Amino acid sequence: MEYSVVCSAGTLTADAAVANIRYCRREVRRIVSRLHVVRSRIMYIENKTDGLSGPARIGRVTYSKSGRTLRYAGLEFRTLDGRGFKANYRDVASGDEYWTEIRGAPERQTETDASR
């Protein structure tokens, strides 16, 4: 989907130029309000339903607008806001508890690190 706003004005009076600028600003705001930016990141996700360790995977999750809900592989997780014992998110549909954390890329091992 492509949007374009053409705000060109040949020779205008000062009042007409101001009106044209206002119109262009309104059009830009209208178009920007339609855009939806999806925030996502790579996270570690572990199911904590059966105990301290459970099935886990690393994958790309997307955030809701408020950031309180994560979506991954068709599942929706709502934050526990610090009320979880061994988990920080809960699956909305099943109620299963999950632990998620942000994982960065692993550090590269250099030759000097390998020789230690």
Image (tube, rainbow, N blue to C red):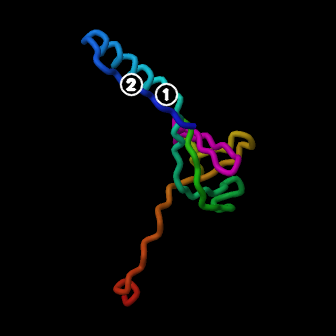
**Neighbourhood count class around disc 2 (C-alpha, 10 Å): few under 14, some 14–19, many 20 upward:** few
Say whether residue 75 is magenta: yes
| Residues rendered magenta in the picture | 66-82
Task: Give the residue type at disc 1.
Answer: Ile
State the residue at coordinates (47%, 62%). Answer: 104
Mark 2: secondary structure: loop
State the residue at coordinates (69%, 46%). Answer: 75
Quarter of the picture containing the N terminus is top right
Nearer to me, 114 or 35: 35
**Mark 2 lies on residue:** 7
Say whether residue 22 is magenta: no
Q: In this view, does 112 lie above or below 17?
A: below
Instruction: Please state if 1 lies on the left or on the right of 14 as rendered.
Output: right
Mark 1: secondary structure: helix
* Residue 54: mark in rendering: none
Report x, y in % for residue 87. 59, 50
| Residue sticking out furthest to the top | 15
**Mark 1 lies on residue:** 31
